[in-house]
Image (cartoon, rainbow, N blue to C red):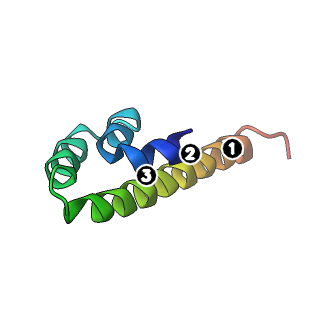
Amino acid sequence: MRLLMAILIPPLVFFTINRPFQGIFCALMWLTMFGWPVAAIWAVYALSQYRNDELRRDMDYDRRYSRY
């Protein structure tokens, strides 16, 4: 769902992953005709980095609090 949102409405993705200043800058870029593809690519990239950070945090938590 977020991936589709990143392609269609790029600034909204930044607000959902708690990056409001990047969301504002992306909204300004999104309003131009030439900036929309760049904003969409940037939003998809930021979303993938956010997912990787979440997975890394979960793995660190599991490793830290596991018995072995």
Tell me if mark 2 has few (under 14), some (14-19) or many (20+) residues whose alpha carbon lies within 10 angstroms of its own. Answer: few
Closest to the observer, 62 or 32: 32
Of the residues shown, which amino acid type is indicated by label 2?
A: Glu
What residue is shown at x 73% (from left), y 47% (from top)? Answer: 63
Q: Which residue is mark 1?
A: 64
What residue is shown at x 52% (from left), y 51% (from top)? Answer: 53
**Looking at the picture, how far across and down is residue 68, in whole percent?**
86, 47
Sequence order check, earlier mark of 1 and 2: 2
Sequence order check, earlier mark of 2 and 3: 3
What residue is shown at x 38% (from left), y 63% (from top)? Answer: 41
What residue is shown at x 20% (from left), y 45% (from top)? Answer: 27
Q: Is 10 on the left or on the right of 33, as rendered?
A: right
Of the residues shown, which amino acid type is indicated by label 1?
A: Arg
Tell me if mark 1 has few (under 14), some (14-19) or many (20+) residues whose alpha carbon lies within 10 angstroms of its own. Answer: few
Of the residues shown, which amino acid type is indicated by label 3?
A: Ile
Question: How far is mark 2 from mark 3, CA to CA?
Answer: 21 Å
| Label 2: which secondary element | helix
Q: Which residue is mark 2?
A: 54
Closest to the observer, 24 or 34: 34
Q: Which residue is mark 3?
A: 7
Figure check: 62 above or below 16 = below
